[in-house]
Image (cartoon, coloured by chain):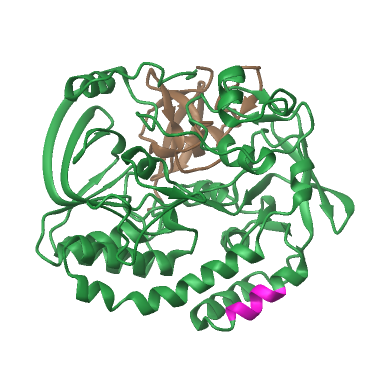
């Protein structure tokens, strides 16, 4: 336990999803020394999660380019601290890695936004992407009854995926209104590749009820989920099911960028035309700069990789493509904006912070995230506010706190390395495990 | 990719596809991954290592995020830790 390794790279990429793979491949092709780091056991990120199935052709293509260019792959490593500028610490299963860089590319992706409602903490109520990830990881879904709910284009992709794997998708509940989706459809007409995806999904989902103005209001069950009650166009309906796959679009993972000191604006990492953050040696690409989907992540990743390798002209050649894809991202934002009624879903007793079991009634009396944290331990468990933070931001309009290391719970030995590499020792960290 | 392997979850033998995560084994065994601080059963939520709801004890090692760890033949998983 606790062995340490030290490595040095010209360009270090954190995150092995589409943005990270494209960034690492393009940088490595410029003959600089590149490493790509990911927390998962293989590259691909969430969208190209491999596990028990074959990978997607695009993932294969980018991974091959990256390997042909001689990139160092570091999987199963979770970055948790930057003891000094230019040095990151990452924890593996049994060891610690010190990673030094000249240029850093943050490609940490996004996570689902979860909103609390009575019963949402029952086993078998999962994220929409969460249930898909579980099925990709080997969970048999054949003949299981699934309700898919929340908001965003991910719901359709997940429903289609689950159905292809034998699930009985009983209903898709989208909180957005039909008119809002119609406007989004018009925006799609300007994006032929997205249109093709949309039509493919429509075919895959033929016969599945798609309800707009609809959201879950209660999940029922003893030890596991048994049924979900939804509000459908103003009327209540209860559906017996095995799984509820529920996510309210995505939120950028900005913790690492924030720890480094990059400026975060409206929940996204601020970047310039070359994907450079407000720190000159740090770039950022993909979802952390704003939720925009896989194609945009690939383009931003390429720009970041080329810019980090000092190929400004080649990077600039991709600006036009990025502009088109960003217009789509803005249309997404408008179409799937959360409606105010969702703030009323949690009852006084509904748990909002799942790590520390803090109910809505205890939180609603505080004016800020910081005050609530100090008084209730909300956000101080092992997820470090990654689940309840975005929820409380929506429910109470609280602003997130500054980020302190380690940005993930780590072993005590890892903290000792932090203490050795620089001061200070961060004691409060592992708080609340167990 | 379709070969099977067996792990134990709270003493219950569970057969999973090779390449399946420990979280999958826990769900198939019908076992909640953990009990929350107020005594509620909890299972996997995010499926990507962020929510920490799926943490279990694997071969005596506590607080493992079961969605990020692949099943190995003969693994002993406990969800009551």
- Magenta residues, start to end: A182-188
Q: Position of residue B18 (x, y in %)?
A: 39, 45
Tell me, yes or no, if residue A25 can be seen here: no
Q: Which residue is at a point 57% across and 59% down the rendered structure image?
A: A165
Which chain is painted in brown?
A: B
Q: Please tell me whether residue A184 belongs to the stretch shown in magenta.
A: yes
Percent coordinates x, y for residue A13 in the rendering: 25, 51
User: In the figure, A260 relative to A236: above or below?
Assistant: above
The percent coordinates of residue A343 (x first, y second) are 74, 43
Residue A27, placed above or below residue A203: above
In the image, A409 versus A243, the foreground residue is: A409
- Residue drawn where x is 44% and y is 38% of the image: B49
Front residue of this view, candidates A175 and A255: A255
Spot the residue most to the right.
A235
Q: Quadrant of residue B70?
A: top left
Question: Is residue A119 or residue B56 the one in the foreground?
Answer: A119
Relative to residue A160, is residue A136 drawn left or right? left
Which of the chains is green? A
Work out whether residue A304 can be spotted: yes
Q: Where is residue B16 drawn, in percent x and y?
A: 46, 41
- The residue at 18%/20% (across/down) is A420
Q: Is residue A365 left or right of residue A417?
A: right
Q: Is the magenta region chiefly helix, strand or loop?
A: helix
């Amino acid at each position: 336990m606790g062995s340490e390794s030290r490595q040095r790279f010209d360009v270090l990429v954190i995150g092995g999803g589409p943005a990270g793979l494209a960034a690492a491949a393009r940088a490595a092709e410029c003959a600089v020394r590149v490493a790509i780091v990911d927390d998962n056991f293989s590259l691909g990120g969430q969208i190209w999660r491999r596990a028990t199935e074959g990978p997607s052709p695009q993932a294969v293509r980018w991974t091959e380019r990256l390997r042909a260019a001689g990139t160092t792959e570091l999987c199963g490593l979770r970055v948790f601290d930057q003891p000094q500028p230019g040095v990151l610490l990452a924890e593996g299963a049994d060891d610690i890695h010190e990673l030094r860089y000249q240029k850093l590319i943050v490609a940490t992706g996004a996570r689902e936004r979860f909103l609390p409602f009575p019963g949402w903490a029952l086993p078998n109520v999962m994220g929409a992407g969460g249930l898909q990830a579980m099925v990709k990881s080997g969970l048999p879904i054949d003949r299981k009854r699934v309700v898919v709910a929340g908001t965003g284009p991910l719901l359709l992709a997940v429903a289609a995926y689950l159905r292809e794997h034998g699930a009985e998708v009983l209903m898709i509940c989208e909180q957005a209104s039909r008119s809002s989706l119609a406007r989004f459809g018009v925006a799609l007409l300007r994006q032929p590749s997205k249109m093709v995806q949309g039509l493919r999904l429509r075919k895959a989902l033929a016969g599945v009820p798609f309800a707009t103005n609809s959201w879950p209001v209660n999940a029922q069950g003893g030890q596991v989920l048994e049924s979900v009650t939804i509000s459908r166009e103003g009327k209540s309906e209860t559906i017996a099911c095995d799984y509820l796959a529920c996510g309210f679009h995505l939120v950028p993972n900005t913790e690492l960028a924030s720890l480094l000191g990059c400026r975060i604006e409206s929940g996204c990492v601020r970047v310039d035309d070359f994907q450079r953050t407000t720190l000159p040696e740090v770039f950022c690409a993909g979802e952390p700069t704003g939720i925009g989907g896989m194609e945009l992540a690939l383009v931003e990743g390429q720009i970041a990789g080329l810019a980090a390798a000092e190929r400004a002209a080649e990077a600039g050649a991709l600006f036009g493509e990025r502009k088109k894809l960003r217009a789509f991202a803005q249309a997404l934002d408008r179409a799937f904006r959360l409606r105010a009624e969702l703030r009323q879903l949690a009852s006084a007793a509904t748990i909002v912070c799942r790590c520390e079991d803090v109910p809505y009634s205890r939180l609603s009396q505080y004016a800020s995230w910081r005050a609530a944290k100090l008084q209730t331990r909300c956000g101080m468990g092992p997820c470090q506010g990654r689940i309840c933070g975005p929820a409380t931001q929506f429910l109470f309009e609280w602003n997130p706190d500054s980020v302190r290391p380690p940005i993930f719970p780590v072993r005590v030995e890892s903290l000792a390395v932090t203490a050795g590499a620089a001061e200070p020792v961060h004691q409060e960290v592992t708080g609340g495990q167990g | 990719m379709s070969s099977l392997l067996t792990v134990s979850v709270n003493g219950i033998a569970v057969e999973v596809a090779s390449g399946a995560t420990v979280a999958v084994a826990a769900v198939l065994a019908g076992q909640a991954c953990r009990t929350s601080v107020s005594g509620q059963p909890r299972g996997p939520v995010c499926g990507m290592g962020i929510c920490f709801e799926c943490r279990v004890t694997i071969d005596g090692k506590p607080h493992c995020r079961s969605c990020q760890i692949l099943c190995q033949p003969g693994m002993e998983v406990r969800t009551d830790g």
